[in-house]
């Protein structure tokens, strides 16, 4: 179980680095304006959706989701090993 959590953490870290490369430039706005806040929220939403999509694709390819679902559905260890 620790390996699965570590795997997901590493994937999240690796793919989050790529999303910072194409940042939107918000430096043209005053930092106390509502336009600056809107620019930051749009930028973070865009990056978050990219990261989520990449992670979901990797999880789908690796089959972890199905293994976790099987683990949750079992009531005993004997059921899990069948």
Image (cartoon, rainbow, N blue to C red):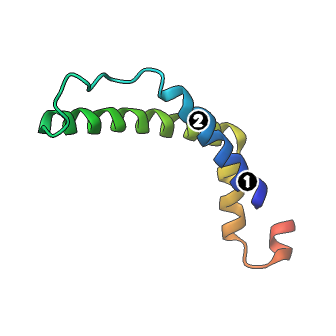
Q: Nearer the viewer, residue 58 or 45?
A: 45
Give above or below for 76 relative to 30: below
Please tell me which of labels 1 and 2 falls first in the chain.
1
Q: Nearer the viewer, mark 1 or mark 2?
A: 1
Of residues 44 and 29, the one nearer the viewer is 29
Cα separation, mark 1 vs mark 2, equals: 16 Å
Neighbour tally class for label 1: few under 14, some 14-19, many 20 plus, Cα within 10 Å:
few
Q: Residue at x 68, y 59 (%)?
A: 68
> Is residue 82 at all visible to an observer of this figure?
no
Q: Residue at x 68, y 43 (%)?
A: 10
| Visible residue check, residue 69 | yes
Residue 57 — which label? 2
Q: Secondary structure at mark 1?
A: helix
Figure label count: 2
How far across and how far down the image is residue 41, in percent? 27, 39
The quadrant holding residue 45 is top left
Quadrant where the C terminus sits is bottom right
Q: Which mark is residue 80?
A: none
Locate residue 26, reporting x and y percent.
26, 26
Question: Which residue is labeled 1 in the image?
Answer: 4
Q: Quadrant of residue 42?
A: top left
Identify whether 3 is placed above or below 35.
below
Please name the residue shown 67% across and 69% down the image: 73
- Residue 33 x %, y %: 12, 37
Above or below, comparing residue 52 to residue 74 in the picture: above
The N terminus appears in which quarter of the rendering?
Answer: bottom right
């Amino acid at each position: 179980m620790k390996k699965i959590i570590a795997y997901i953490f590493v994937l999240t870290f690796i793919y989050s680095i790529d999303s910072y490369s194409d940042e939107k430039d918000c430096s043209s706005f005053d930092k106390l304006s509502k336009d600056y806040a809107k620019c930051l929220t749009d930028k973070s939403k865009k990056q978050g959706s990219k990261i989520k999509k990449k992670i979901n694709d990797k999880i789908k390819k690796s089959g972890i989701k199905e293994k976790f679902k099987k683990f949750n559905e079992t009531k005993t260890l004997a059921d899990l090993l069948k």
